[in-house]
């Protein structure tokens, strides 16, 4: 195989418009912090150049998530969903962030919405796989705690026990 064949083969391929840019790493756990910071700065500049591009904001949110910056990741993914409410990848990554934060009820809702936005069998399979993982976590040892019950009775019982212990200690 010659170089000419490789160049003529790739020369006719047009880059897809408004597609996700490639990530500079294969394993997100092995990316260096300096490379990640450089990539984030490039994505910020690209987002300023194209403020209506939801794909760039999705990539920015993913890059922030790799760097464990949850709040900036959440903001970028929410902006991507606001710019393009029908963007599958923004929706799926937003749901995945909730899944990784173990907000499983919200992750399930958002993943269900991503499955509704799926435009190809591959996208639908990704959403279903994520939904399966969420449901496995919900049915295993991880539980979502929701504070829907009032805590006045347990607080009063605790205060009464502390008062009783205090009286017993003062009695002796």
Image: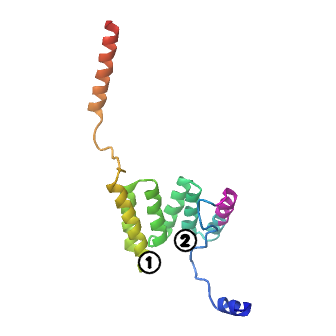
Picture residue at 45% right of the left edge, 70% below the top:
85
Q: Secondary structure at mark 1?
A: helix
Label 1 packing within 10 angstroms: few (<14), some (14-19), many (20+):
few
The residue at the far front in this view is 1
Q: Which residues are magenta?
A: 31-42
Q: At numbered mark 2, what does the secondary structure look like: helix, strand or loop? A: helix
The residue shown at (26%, 31%) is 153
Q: Quadrant of residue 165?
A: top left
Task: Tally the marks.
Answer: 2
Query: How far from the left and from the top, in percent, is residue 48?
Result: 63, 66
Q: Image check: 35 left or right of 155?
A: right
Q: Is residue 41 magenta?
A: yes
Residue 56 seen: yes
Residue 55 has which mark? 2
Is residue 87 at least partly visible in the picture? no
Image point 57% across, 53% down: which residue? 69
Q: Answer few, some or many: residues within 10 Å of disc 2's Cα (few below 14, many 20 plus, some between 14 and 19).
A: many
Residue designated by label 1 = 122
Q: Quadrant of residue 12?
A: bottom right
Residue 80 placed where, x, y %? Answer: 51, 66
User: Magenta stretch mostly in which secondary structure?
Assistant: helix
- Drawn side of residue 4 relative to residue 84, left or right: right
Residue 96: horizontal and vertical position, in percent? 46, 62
- Give the number of the mark in front: 2 or 1: 1
Residue 161 percent location from the top left of the image: 30, 22
Q: Quadrant of residue 91?
A: bottom left
Q: How is the image coloured?
A: rainbow
Residue 58 forms part of the magenta stretch: no
User: Can you name the residue that lies furthest to the right here?
Assistant: 3
Labels 2 and 1: the sequence-earlier one: 2
């Amino acid at each position: 195989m010659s170089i000419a064949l490789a160049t003529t083969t790739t020369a006719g391929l047009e880059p897809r418009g408004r597609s996700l840019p490639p990530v500079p790493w294969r394993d997100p756990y092995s990316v260096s912090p300096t490379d990640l910071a450089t990539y984030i700065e490039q994505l910020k500049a690209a987002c300023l150049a194209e403020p209506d591009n939801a794909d760039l904001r999705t990539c920015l949110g993913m890059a922030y998530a790799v760097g464990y910056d949850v709040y900036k990741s959440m903001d970028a993914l929410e902006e991507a969903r606001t710019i393009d409410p029908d963007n599958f990848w923004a929706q799926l990554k937003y749901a995945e962030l909730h899944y990784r934060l173990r907000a499983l009820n919200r992750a399930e809702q958002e993943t269900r919405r991503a499955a509704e936005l799926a435009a190809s069998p591959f996208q639908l399979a990704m959403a279903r796989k994520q939904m399966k993982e969420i449901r496995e976590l919900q049915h295993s040892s991880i539980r979502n705690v929701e504070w829907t019950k009032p805590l006045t009775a347990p607080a009063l019982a605790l205060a009464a026990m502390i008062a009783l212990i205090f009286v017993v200690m003062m009695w002796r």
